Amino acid sequence: MNTQDDPTAQDPQTAAGTGTPEAAPAETESPDVTDTTDASDTTETSTAVFVRRGRTPALGLWVAICLAVPAVGALLASPFLGLPDLPSVLNLILLAIMFVGVPLAAIAALIDAIRHRGPRTPRS
């Protein structure tokens, strides 16, 4: 093994920790010596990495935003509506998600479907 490749190998000049140079070892490996490991010992697995090149967010993010914005809005509006307890606040949040968030998510899904639809081919 080449000491240039091993980060834990100590420099022979400062191996004693005194900073004084020591004698170099008598046998050193030449840089052209390769590591002879058996190819059958190492099994490599290939991993596919998919990268999105576009900067447009995915549909799942738009749906999550469409559901979260009315929920947070209802949570922030609940003190101003005078709701007395936690079950009524949760009821308002669920109603906002159902009647505002779900239609917004459906509109986002429809827009995404129209945008990703391929060009129309004429029927022959």
Image: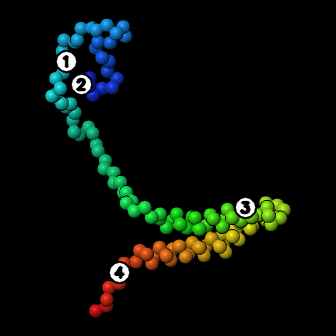
In percent of width and height, residue 38 lies at 21, 35
Q: CA distance from mark 4 to mark 2?
A: 59 Å
Residue 57 located left or right of residue 26? right
Q: CA distance from mark 1 to mark 3?
A: 72 Å
Of labels 1 and 3, the one closer to you: 3
Question: Mark 4: few, some, or many residues within 10 Å (few <14, many ≥20)?
Answer: few
Whether pointer 4 and pointer 2 mark residues with C-beta atoms closer than 8 Å, the reply is no
Please identify the quarter of the rendering in which residue 12 is found.
top left
- Where is mark 1, residue-wise? 28
Q: CA distance from mark 2 to mark 1?
A: 9 Å
In the rendered structure, which disc, 4 or 2, sits on the residue that comes first in sequence?
A: 2
Q: Is residue 36 above or below residue 102?
A: above
Q: Is residue 6 above or below residue 47?
A: above
Q: CA distance from mark 1 to mark 4?
A: 67 Å
Q: Which amino acid type is shown beneath numbered disc 4? A: Pro
Mark 2 residue element: loop
Whether pointer 2 and pointer 1 mark residues with C-beta atoms closer than 8 Å, the reply is no
Q: Which amino acid type is shown beneath numbered disc 2? A: Asn
In the rendered structure, which disc, 2 or 1, sits on the residue that comes first in sequence?
A: 2
- Where is mark 2, residue-wise? 2
Question: Mark 1: few, some, or many residues within 10 Å (few <14, many ≥20)?
Answer: few
Q: Is residue 27 above or below residue 62?
A: above
Question: Mark 2: few, some, or many residues within 10 Å (few <14, many ≥20)?
Answer: some
What residue is rendered at 45% in x and 78% in y?
Answer: 114
In the rendered structure, which disc, 4 or 3, sits on the residue that comes first in sequence?
A: 3
Instruction: Name the image quarter holding the N terminus.
Output: top left
Q: Residue 119 got which mark? A: 4
Of labels 3 and 2, the one closer to you: 3
Residue 49 located left or right of residue 2? right
Residue 4 located left or right of residue 31? right
Q: Residue 76 got which mark? A: 3
